[in-house]
Image (cartoon, helix red, strand yellow):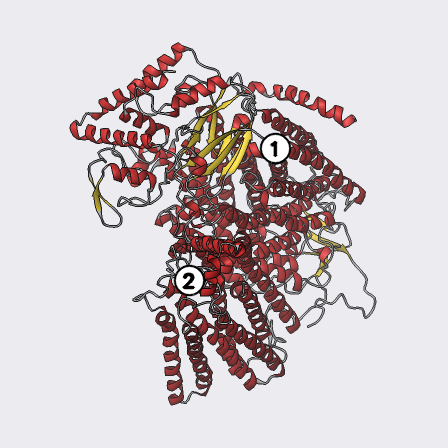
Amino acid sequence: MSTLEAAEPDTHGHDDHGHDHPAFLAHHFDTPEQQFDSGKLGIWLFLVTEVLFFSGMFCAYAIFRMTRPDVFEGCSQFLNTKLGAINTGVLLFSSLTMAWAVRCSQTEEHKKLTALLAATLSCAMVFLGVKSIEYSHKWGMGLLPAGYFTYNPNNPHPEGGTNWLIWLCLPFALLLVGVVIWLVISVVKGNKFQTACAMPLSVVCLSFFLGVGLGTILESGEAQGGHDVAHADADHPAGAVDAAGSVVSQDETVVGGGVVRERLVKDASNTGLQDEFVARRTQMELATGTVVTDRSDVADAVSAVPQEVLTPSRAGVFFGIYYCMTGVHAIHILGGIGVLVWLLVRSIRQDFNRQYFGPVDYVGLYWHLVDLIWIYLFPLLYLIR
Amino acid sequence: MNLQIFESQLPAMSTKLSFFAQPFLGDVNDGFWFPTQASSFAAEADWVYFMILWISVLFFVPMMAFMAYCSWKYAKSKGTKAESQKSHDTPLELAWSILPSFLLVWMFLQGTWSYLDIRTPPDGAYDIGVQAFKWGWTFDYGNGTFHPELHVLKDEPTKLSMRSSDVIHSLFIPAFRVKKDVVPGRYNYMWFQPSIQSETVSESELAAAKAEFAVAGGAWDYEKYQFTPDGYRFYDLFCAEYCGKDHSKMQTVVVVHETQEELDAWIKQYSVRPPGDEPAVYGEKLYNRRGCGSCHSIDGSKRVGPSFQGFYDRQHEFVSGESIIADDNYVRESILIPKAKIVAGYAPVMPSYKGQLSDDDIDSLIAYLKSLSSAASTSESSASGTSDQSAAAVTVESAP
Amino acid sequence: MSSGSIPKGRIVRDPGFPTERENYLTTSKGVFSWLFTLDHKRIGMMYLVGVTVAFLVAGLLALAIRFHLLAPGGWLFNRPIFKSFTDKDPNDIYNQVFTLHGAIMVFLFIIPSIPAALGNFLVPVMLGAKDVAFPRLNLSSFYLWVFGAIFFVSALFASGLDTGWTFYTPYSTTTDSSVILATMGAFILGFSSIFTGLNFIVTINTMRPPGMTWFKMPLFLWATYSTSIIQVLATPVLGITLLLLIAERTMHIGIFDPEFNGDPVTYQHFFWFYSHPAVYIMILPAFGIISELISVHSHKHIFGYRFIAYSSIAIALLGFLVWGHHMFTAGMSSLTTIIFSALTFTVSIPSAIKVFNWLATMYKGSISLTTPMCYALSFIFLFTIGGLTGLFLGTLATDLHLHDTYFIVAHFHYVMVGGTLVAFMGGVFHWWPKMVGKMYNEFGGRISAALVFLGFNLTFLPQFVLGSRGMPRRYATYDPEFAFLHQVSTFGALLLGIGILVALVVLMYSLWNGRKAPANPWGGATLEWMCTSPPPFYNFDRAPVVGDPYDFEFIEWDNENERYVTAEPERKLAPGQKPEPVHAKH
């Protein structure tokens, strides 16, 4: 016997299909449990694809860090650890509010749910605000992927370039204006639901600029130390070696900022430090990518054919990977903001109850993953010592 | 022990068996499946091939026969019940899962042993540098001797150190059964030991071809003559990794010399400008030999780079907006640092020839460029002039 | 037992024909009822139309390739007619044509063909479910496919694509063709594929009907499930690889491009980490189809169900470990090369198991040589050749010679075309009555199967010899010594094209002139044959109870109505006992 249909007539025909279905239960599911389990499995699988998506970049990171550890260590000095740490804290906090929000959706505390979702959104915006400070600062200095890498240690802050910060802030500013106008209109019209939506959203938009402000303060605090030691970690003493070449390699090369160090290097007996000095200098040259090794020995023929393909800006590789990883992560934050806004509106509509809280749960899982990825990115990129 | 006996007999068996497949197509030298076995690996690789082939046939034929038998024997009219509904037989299934695995292990081991031979170049192998570019090859015989043909010595382990100046290529010599990608940004190595020397054609045949070539002009047509301008029969060398427009024309030839003296003589012939050659004449040889023609035409047609016809002594616009009259210095710079000045309308794709051309080579090329410009400007009927010139070039080149 | 009569004392069950209102094709009308449908069957049909169009386009390109290779110096693209509308070099045209042939075939046809088109239609029906778990996601997968296709077409019209479908760097980062448009297309198609796979995994996990344990699933579902695992696990890596490639091309991030210190071999590792498992995305569903076809048309229980099911999963997992065999000549270390070679051999075992099991299924069966069965038989023939020639390529000593020659071309066409395409066509012929409710002309169908079989072998058998004699692939021109075999191959391609055209005509003709299809035209025992042809909108009025999907004991031929029916002996129920509950709970 292979299959047979149940002999008993069943009222569960498709004509009156859904008669025992609550509104939130899709027609093709039998029970809310089945629907929830399907969604849960679905989101976990999606997270698996996300992890694999990022794993490609982590692999690239591992390969290049293994083959050129010097470049990675050197270039990492250009990343501002303080800003990275602030962002890590902000995201961790947002994970807390998100987890709490999931709980509230189960216990049907609608007001609290809305507030927590808004808090999560605000954290996301602060994160982006700080990030835009970091990005615009580096773009201004020419710390870009290999193809556009124009960083000049003599003149780290060229005048007259595009002010990238304005361009990054512009869309958010427009958004803020739009939301505020919406808020005013809905208040004037007396539409309670729209007012309830627009209020938290305008706070959320505003927090982007909170992040920008925060970033500006921290970044300028860094810069006060003077540019020859700038952009190194603030915890780094002023005389520390700024490996990737914030100082020029001329005849009178000063690799570290410290005068003492300079003198020590000149001492011929101090071979250990001299070796280090030579290594750093080579690394610096390679990191800035300006030196083309000249090998015009004709007799040596093909084996001496120029290292041309090997020269331009090795540092660009680090920044290429940096922008790819953090950029894709930022896109995920933006995507998260999108779905969180959708959740916010639904929570204000009080869609969720103890039987139906799947969407909050799924978005929560997604948000934790985005946080988790940042928690890996932060030490891997910022804390290379 | 038994296995060893079996193994020692198999090569003989396989050559016998491959003989059966011969009559379909081949030339006299070639088998049905493979070109001539011209290196020490060839016999080994072919042996592995035929071993797998016969094992596969041994499986394939009975299986298909069984399938045909079933679809004939058990073809029934609709509604007839099957004779059996047997759903599984675990011992049988385990057997046919596990037993063939032993054959697979054996295949793997055979393939890997042969591969390790192919992989590890012996110490002291004769080293030839290879530069692959779109779309041609340059072989470096040391001491500034470069040539687009690969000339090697019979029974001498030869190692190729290969690099690419643009995209990935792959050096493939079917007769030697070897292949290796040439990847930009790194060196790849391969080695082989040729086992059959190339024949030479008769003087008269060579002279006839030379005469014909002198009339036709252009590049030497290996396919047509089936021997090199020096009168050697050859093996094909292909680029096997797709590399763009003229990928299929990125072919050259391999010539195997019998004695070291013969090879040395051949190399010497190309090492420096022969005493009697005018720089312009030698420049043309270099133009042909070093593959300049794959990007720069001499008839004014547009290729990857600007045409050499009427190039010298003319005003050229650059991408940067400047313009300059092409003189000796500009040409020299363009050969050594091609990306310094890019002619408007072209991409910065030319690799540097620094270290690959001697000063005299560059002077010769400049002289050749000059001759092309003056020829173009003085008379419109430059075609006859060029062919005369190339005829002269060939006669000199063929002098041993 | 004489054929054609149903034993007395049996309860005959047959769902009959659907009413116009029930029939999913006619239940609602208008273009928008299709474009915005959430019904998996309609989405499946839209996919079917889409992939068929993609296949025909790419197939025409294939013919163009073959006709260019008619003469050693190139034939087709040297014709004056091409000069009149393009100033491109014939070699350039050839390169673009073979690139588009490969890219369209792989990304737009083979990968979505069986899982997205047939899978969408069949998975929920075979499960007795009303739809896939996420119908909206399903529809968005389809539209992602459409967008991806649009990107590919726009790449064609922008400045063509000449990188080969593998987009190897640094060629792809330096060429001036529309690499970005095409990679964006492939990126989008990747997400379409991921969402389809995700949907199927969830559907099969959570929506199986009561009674259908894992080992009572039809083998097509096992195959789809394994495929979906690969889609979900491998495709994201392709996504990031293509994204990095785009970044490399636009921003020169220096990961893949040696000019900026990148490493082209890293790209190959990244690319094949996806694209080798993708080979199994292409072939595993074909295995599933053949398992169904052989069993149903032999009217015999599939032999070694568990071995076939496990081998699908084994292939899915092992498929992740062998990507390096595409790069034996690229200059990996000896150790890596040898490990990849060893792993490659392990993959061949599960494939062999399946072929043995199919042959054993036919033994002592009651075989109907219908069109789908003809396709299934030619699948076994062609796939076995494809699989066995894979051994030459997994063996290091021979691969060094055969890599990147026509031997490879022939090998993967035997697997992709002889395997996947033939199985796809067999599947379409098998489920066509179910999908459209019409029977096609059997004779025409069999002619098409024969033509495809002959044409295919004529096209690709000579290419093995071309390859072993040293003809490299992707050559627009070739040495005259290869001319004869190339010409035979071109003639075969023409025959293959005619065979496919015949199949298309037979199917199209049935739409207007075909006999109304019964619910069970072949005598299958899986759930899709238990609902009407075509299925009603909700598939099953009452959810079915499930037994062994390959138990043909009570499937009987009803000669009068030319259909198979389920005829079971009456079973006495104890007083007060109710039949098995349909749903576990409401």
Residue identifier under label 2: A246
- SS for callout 1: helix
- A155 lies above or below C561: below
Kind of element beneath mark 2: loop
- Look at label 2 and name its amino acid: Ser
Q: Chain of mark 2?
A: A
From this view, report whether residue C94 is shown above or below residue C228.
above
Q: Quadrant of the N terminus of chain A?
A: bottom right
Do marks 2 and 1 both belong to one polypeptide chain?
A: no
Q: Which one is nearer the viewer's eye here, B94 or A19?
A: B94
Q: Which residue is mark 1?
A: C397
Q: CA distance from mark 2 to mark 1?
A: 52 Å
Q: Where B393 sits versus C395, above or below?
A: above
Q: Is residue C90 visible?
A: yes
Q: In the depicted view, which residue is nearer to us: C538 or B355?
A: B355
- Asked if marks 2 and 1 touch (Cβ < 8 Å), the reply is no
